[in-house]
Each structure stands twice: as structure tokens, then as C-alpha cells.
């Protein structure tokens, strides 16, 4: 009897302790990740303005690549996988992610953008969030099987803060890992840190970009056909982005094992291409071009130039992320489709903005919510169609190679498999 009572009390104490540790973790991750993302956005905005004001900085891109490659080869070889490392640690935990990832990816991204590399910012925020969160595994003595909770919180907090889209961040943190780790506890924790980090981020002097969509098409049979068609095109564009990235990484740069040399050569090639073909509008995030794509017709094939420059920049070893470039690619591709699709330019740009991202990351539900948070919930029915169609026609691979073996667990794929079996 006494042993049973001791066992029950021990279990109660263990449960109470876990809840206490999770509450403390939520609070600290929200504060630290939200603050880190805010300071990162402020510093990124500063280096971007410096690059715009001083176009000659592009000549330093090869040296920036050399520095990034050197420091990652000497101090960060184990964290060079970036987002793939986080996904691998969630799937098969092995060792704690070094806190070194936070300052290194931050500095690497700033150098990339200061000297003109074409990259994003989501990868940086997610990696900072995850590396910050993973430190609490040892500090608060979480058990090994509970570690995934910290990493999910890290992903959700970083994504929510950097884009100002907490609802999308919650789903993104689970869709990106194939829904394998979702339960009530992990879902609740993701909600808390996503909104918490977003709140903390907005305490700093940062402002997320607002986009406006005008003249949404009526939902009728004819327009449903066009929505499905452009969804297919966006999905095919996602495949192009993924496969081009694989080609540059596995074919062009695979023979260079030395990270500093690879980034130096990559930076030199980008510099030459920018000078010959006047590719300056496609450097950095490209926010101004994204905004323009919602307002008036752009030049043809803007999306293709950004696509090639981005995948080459990242394959060479520069730091940042893929998501904002995917926004650029999707919005400008949507803008181009105005030549054949009878929708407004702003509507097409918005549809492409999130749908190419949906196909490339295999996160359609997160992209639907992101579209709603950015453009308003009245646009949801359109995003449901274009994001799911883009996802369905985007192949079986993601921009994150570690995610590929998790995709079979996605609800849409499970539905597709069941329908196929019944047929």
C-alpha cells in the first residue's frame, strides 16, 4: 500500500515538474526567440539599406563568401545543415543543437545580404529559434523523448516572429515534420510560443510589410478552372525551384569540398552575372519588386531570374533562407500570368505569393493561413484551391531534403492514398 502511494505521488510530482518546466520554457523561448528575431530584422533592414545606398558592396561578395565558408568550416561544420539539421533532430534525436548556430547564421545572413546575395530570412529565424529552444533540454533537464517539444516551439516562435504570422507558424511547425509529433501538448505549446514570440517581436521598432489585394474574382465554374490551372503552374514552379537547387548543389558545387573556396567561387560567379546582366533588382530579399508585382505589370520572367540567382546563392554556401525569395518568385510569376488569366494583377500576385511556397515546402495548410494573415480572411477560399493544387502538383520532394521521408504522413497524402486504394 505504501509503495503504491509513493508511486502515485512520484508520478504526480513528475507531471507537475514537467508542466512547470514547459511553462518556463514557453515564457523564455517566446522572449528570447521573439527578441532575437526582432533584432535580426532590425539589423537585416540596416544592412539592406546600406547595400542599396552603396551598390559597390557587390564587389565584396566573393570575400563575404570566403568569410562565411571559413567560419562555418572551422566553427560550425556540424550546424551547416541549417533547417535540415533541426528536422533530423526531431525525427531521430542524437545530440543537442549548438547555441553557436544562432550567432553564426545571424552573422552569415547579414554578410550575405550586405554584399548582395539573393536569400531570405525565414531560415535564419527558424534556426535561431530552434537553437535557443534546444538549450533548455539541458538547462531544465528534459528527458530525451520530450526534446521534440522544444524544437517544435523553436520553429514556431522563429517563424511567427519573423513574418508576423503566428497562426501560420503553428501549422508550419507541424506540417514541416509531417504531423508525426502532433498531440495536445505540442499543439498548445506551439500556440503559446507563436503568439508570445510575435508579441515580443512587436515590442521592438519593427514593422512587417502589408500587401493589398484588389478585385478578387467571383467564384464560379469558369474562375474555378483558372484557379486550378494557376495552382498547377505554381506547383510546377515549385518543382523547378527544388530541382534547380539540387542541380546546383549536387552537380555544380559537389566537386568543391572546401567551404570557403566554394562560397568564394560562388560569390565571384554571382558578381560576374550581376554586372553582365544587370541583376541588381534580384539581390537580397527583393521586397520592393514583390510590392511592385501587386501594383502593375512587370517585365517578363522576373521570377526565373530570382529563382536561378537564389538557388545558386544558397548552393554556394551563403546563408539566409528560401521563403522570401519564394514569395518573390510566386508573386512575380502570378504577375506574369496576368497576360493569360482574367484576374487582377494583385490577386494573381497574392495567389502566387503563398502557393509556390506551399509547393516548395509541402506546407499547404500553413500557407493558407499565412495568406489569410497577410491579405485578409476573405481571400481564404482562393488560397484553399491554389495552395492545395500547387502542393498536389509539386512532386514528392521539398526544399528541405530531411523533410522528404516525412511527407507520406501529410493528411492530404493520406487522403490521396485512401482514394487511390478505393479506386
Image: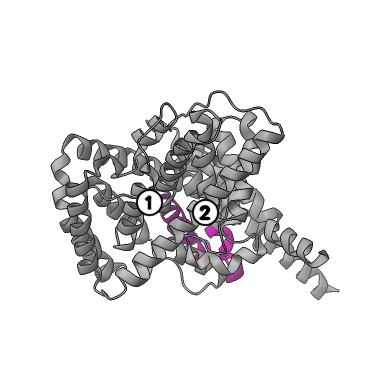
Q: Is residue 19 left or right of residue 81?
A: right
Q: Quadrant of residue 414?
A: bottom right
The residue at the point 20 percent across, 64 percent down is 265
Residue that carries the numbered disc 2 in the rendered image: 236
Q: Is residue 156 magenta?
A: no
Local crowd size for mark 1, using a 10 Å CA cut-off: few (<14), some (14–19), many (≥20): many
Residue that carries the numbered disc 1 in the rendered image: 307
Using the image as rendered, state which of residue 160 and residue 239 is in the foreground: 239
Task: Give the main secondary structure, helix, strand or loop, of the magenta stretch.
Answer: helix
Q: Is residue 308 above or below residue 407?
A: above
Assign a secondary structure to mark 1.
helix
Report if the CB atoms under discs 1 and 2 are less than 8 Å apart.
no
- Residue 171 appearing in the image: no
* Nearer the camera: disc 1 or disc 2: 2
- Range shown magenta: 125-151
The residue at the point 47 percent across, 34 percent down is 339
Using the image as rendered, state which of residue 233 and residue 11 is in the foreground: 233
Nearer-N-terminus badge (1/2): 2
Assign a secondary structure to mark 2.
helix
Q: Quadrant of the N terminus?
A: bottom right
Q: Is residue 407 above or below residue 237?
A: below
- Whole-percent x, y for residue 84 in the image: 46, 65
Amino acid at each position: 500500500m505504501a509503495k503504491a502511494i509513493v508511486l502515485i505521488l512520484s508520478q504526480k510530482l513528475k507531471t507537475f515538474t514537467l508542466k512547470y518546466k514547459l511553462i518556463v520554457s514557453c515564457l523564455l523561448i517566446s522572449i528570447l526567440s521573439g527578441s532575437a528575431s526582432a533584432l535580426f530584422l532590425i539589423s537585416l533592414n540596416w544592412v539592406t539599406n546600406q547595400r542599396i545606398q552603396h551598390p559597390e558592396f557587390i564587389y565584396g561578395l566573393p570575400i563575404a563568401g570566403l568569410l562565411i565558408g571559413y567560419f562555418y568550416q572551422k566553427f560550425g561544420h556540424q550546424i551547416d545543415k541549417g533547417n535540415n539539421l533541426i528536422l533530423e533532430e526531431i525525427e531521430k534525436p542524437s545530440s543537442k543543437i549548438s547555441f553557436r548556430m544562432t550567432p553564426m547564421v545571424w552573422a552569415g545572413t547579414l554578410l550575405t545580404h550586405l554584399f548582395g546575395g539573393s536569400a531570405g530570412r525565414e531560415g535564419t529565424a527558424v534556426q535561431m529559434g530552434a537553437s535557443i529552444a534546444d538549450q533548455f533540454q539541458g538547462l531544465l533537464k528534459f528527458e530525451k523523448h520530450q526534446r521534440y517539444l522544444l524544437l517544435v516551439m523553436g520553429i514556431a516562435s522563429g517563424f511567427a516572429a519573423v513574418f508576423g504570422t503566428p497562426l501560420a507558424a503553428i501549422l508550419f511547425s507541424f506540417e514541416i515534420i509531417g504531423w508525426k509529433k502532433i498531440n495536445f501538448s505540442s499543439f498548445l505549446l506551439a500556440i503559446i510560443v507563436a503568439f508570445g514570440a510575435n508579441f515580443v517581436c512587436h515590442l521592438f521598432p519593427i514593422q512587417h510589410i502589408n500587401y493589398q489585394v484588389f478585385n478578387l474574382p467571383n467564384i464560379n465554374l469558369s474562375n474555378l478552372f483558372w484557379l486550378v490551372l494557376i495552382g498547377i503552374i505554381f506547383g510546377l514552379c515549385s518543382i523547378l525551384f527544388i530541382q534547380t537547387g539540387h542541380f546546383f548543389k549536387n552537380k555544380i558545387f559537389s566537386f568543391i569540398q572546401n567551404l570557403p573556396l566554394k562560397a568564394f567561387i560562388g560569390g565571384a560567379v554571382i558578381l560576374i552575372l550581376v554586372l553582365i546582366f544587370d541583376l541588381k533588382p534580384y539581390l537580397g530579399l527583393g521586397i520592393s519588386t514583390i510590392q511592385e508585382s501587386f501594383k502593375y505589370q512587370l517585365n517578363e520572367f522576373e521570377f526565373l531570374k530570382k529563382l536561378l540567382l537564389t538557388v545558386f546563392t544558397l548552393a554556394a554556401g551563403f546563408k539566409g533562407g528560401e521563403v522570401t525569395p519564394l514569395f518573390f518568385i510566386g508573386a512575380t510569376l502570378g504577375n506574369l500570368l496576368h497576360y493569360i488569366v482574367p484576374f487582377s494583377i494583385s490577386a494573381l500576385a497574392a495567389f502566387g505569393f503563398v502557393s509556390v511556397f506551399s509547393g516548395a515546402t509541402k506546407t499547404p495548410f500553413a500557407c493558407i493561413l499565412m495568406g489569410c494573415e497577410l491579405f485578409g480572411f476573405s481571400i481564404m477560399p482562393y488560397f484553399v484551391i491554389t495552395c492545395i493544387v500547387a502542393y498536389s502538383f509539386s512532386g514528392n520532394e521539398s526544399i528541405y531534403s530531411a523533410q522528404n521521408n516525412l511527407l507520406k504522413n501529410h493528411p492530404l497524402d493520406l487522403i490521396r492514398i485512401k482514394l487511390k486504394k478505393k479506386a
